[in-house]
Amino acid sequence: MSVDMNLLKQLREATFAPLKDCKDALVEANGDLQQAKEILKEKWILKAGKKSERETNEWIVKVVNKNGKIAWIKLLCETDFVAKNEWFIQLCDDLLDKVLAENVFFLSKQDAPTNLSELLDKLVKEAVWTIWENMQLDDIILTNENGFVYNHPGNKVASIVFFEWPDSDVAKELALQVAAMNPSYLDFDSVPSDIVSQMEAQFRQEILDSWKPENMVDQILKWKLSKALAEDVLLEQEYIRDGSKKVKSIVPDWFTVKSFIRLAVK
């Protein structure tokens, strides 16, 4: 039986199933598009167990600030083809709407209300057959803290900067910096003491081994430690718009940065 190429194209665009599977489904359905979709769905259900074991190496992350709430979602899939598809991006937006409807706040999927987690997982499982590949809800966040959100083009990286003073221009610059440079700590005081101690011990030994004058050891140690940590400390990083400045130079004294989150998939 010959297959109508227009129907084949429609079925492929609607289900993302392999072309051969689409053609076989149309033949079995005698050219009935809706029946062909049901046939593909039944076939996918039989294969779902195996597909759930396949690696999800592509993703999108999105964050929104709406009605005093900040919500973030990380959705995984197998291929870049699906990650860039409008249907997949819309699914992410639909899931975000469900998160924003909650009034219980949390900073990880593990801490989310059980009913919300179960609802989102159910919606993802129902949607999986449509894209014909494995898909996973990796993480979600919902908070009512004051913050500025930034979504980098491509939906691979996003960031949130939490602050106290209502100046979104400064917060925006910090959010761009976080997304671009991936710092781990806000300032030197935020670096865990055990990491600092370990680095100090390593650098001190290196300085002593180089036979530097004893009265210069502490000064050199301080310089080496500051330089090593600067790349990982937000306020000490080079400002992305002007490498001659540090990020802290664009933050006024009256502006308080509380914390930040960089959203991506490792």
Image (spheres, rainbow, N blue to C red):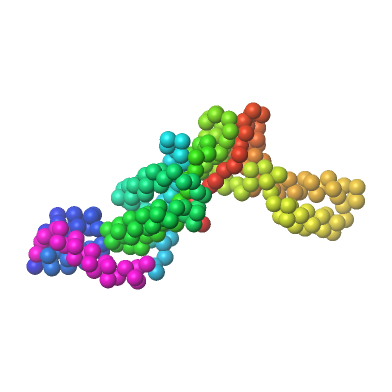
* Residue sitting at x 46%, y 52%: 112
Query: Does the magenta stretch mainly form a helix, a strand or a loop?
Result: helix
Magenta part of the chain: 30-52
Horizontally, residue 111 falls left or right of residue 122, namely: right
Q: Nearer the viewer, residue 113 or 52?
A: 113
Horizontally, residue 200 falls left or right of residue 33, namely: right
Relative to 164, does residue 46 appear above or below in the rendering?
below
Q: Nearer the viewer, residue 165 or 243?
A: 165
Regarding residue 60, the answer to whether it shows in the image is yes
Horizontally, residue 93 falls left or right of residue 217, namely: left
Tell me if residue 38 is in the magenta stretch. yes
Relative to 37, does residue 103 appear above or below in the rendering?
above
* Residue sitting at x 19%, y 57%: 11
| Residue 199 position in % (x across, y down) | 74, 55
* Residue sitting at x 46%, y 46%: 104
Relative to 12, does residue 143 appear above or below in the rendering?
above
Regarding residue 173, the answer to whether it shows in the image is no
Residue 47 position by quadrant: bottom left
Tell me if residue 91 is in the magenta stretch. no
| Residue 4 position in % (x across, y down) | 11, 59
| Residue 240 position in % (x across, y down) | 57, 38
Horizontally, residue 108 falls left or right of residue 117, namely: right
For the N terminus, the image quarter is: bottom left
Residue 132 position by quadrant: bottom left
| Residue 131 position in % (x across, y down) | 30, 58
Tally of numbered tags: 0
Residue 122 position by quadrant: bottom left
Relative to 61, does residue 37 appear above or below in the rendering?
below
* Residue sitting at x 64%, y 28%: 254
